Image (spheres, rainbow, N blue to C red):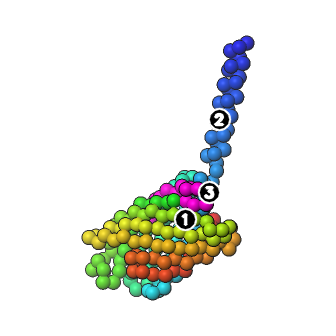
Amino acid sequence: MRKTKIAGILLAAASSAVFSAASAANDGSMSNFSYDYFEARVGISPVTYGVGFSTSIHPNAHIRAEIDSEFESDFDATAAIGFHAPVNNWADVYGELGLRSMKQRGRFDHDTELGVEVNLGVRQWLGPQLEVGGELGHVSIDSDEDIFGSVFGRFHATELFSLGAQIRFNEAYGDQFMFTTRFKY
């Protein structure tokens, strides 16, 4: 009788743990922000156009691809895999390791060059609809090694749509101001 009670208690505890773990595994994300989006952007000085895509591959990991161009036989493209994790109830820290490809006038002898990018950033909610953040990274292409950064603000008009402004420092097209729009899916 005693063995039956002990076995019943252990079975109940084990099944509770299994259902709890299954419930946690079904949570969409372990962060404060969505990393599932399409993005369109326009840069100013120089004028560039770009698109981006990001999707979660794990509750704390994502992949990202983006490309920008002046449409003058040039481009700046990135494909990256990264992590994201909450710092507190209102902020996330993220980092990425990416493959970067560039073709630009006056740089790399008009050839397409491949390199590596590493970055680390933070995203913070300032209110129910206002997000701010920043990023610092390192890119190594051919014999060029540069440190780059950006700061941004994003207004979430709805749960699925946001408008943003970003300032990029020492990026492929130099220092640049950008307008962005994101569509969450």
| Residue at (57, 65) in percent of width and height | 124
Residue 150: % across, % down: 46, 73
Instruction: Establish if 32 lies above or below 175.
Output: above
Secondary element type, mark 2: helix
| Residue at (42, 64) in percent of width and height | 119
The amino acid on which the numbered mark 3 sits, given as a three-letter code, is: Asn
Asked if the residue at tag 1 contacts the one at tag 2, i.e. Cβ–Cβ closer than 8 Å, the answer is no
Mark 2, other Cα within 10 Å: few <14 / some 14–19 / many ≥20: few
Q: Is residue 21 left or right of residue 69?
A: right
In this figure, which residue is indicated by the disc labeled 1?
123
Of the numbered discs 3 and 2, the one sitting upstream in the chain is 2
Asked if the residue at tag 3 contacts the one at tag 1, i.e. Cβ–Cβ closer than 8 Å, the answer is no
Instruction: Establish if 145 lies above or below 6.
Output: below
Highlighted magenta segment, given as a residue range: 79-92
Magenta highlight on residue 87: yes
In this figure, which residue is indicated by the disc labeled 2?
17
The amino acid on which the numbered mark 1 sits, given as a three-letter code, is: Arg
Mark 1 to mark 3: distance in Å? 11 Å
Mark 3 to mark 2: distance in Å? 25 Å
Q: Is residue 99 visible?
A: no
**Residue 89 image label:** 3
Query: Could you say which quadrant of the image residue 102 lies in?
Result: bottom left
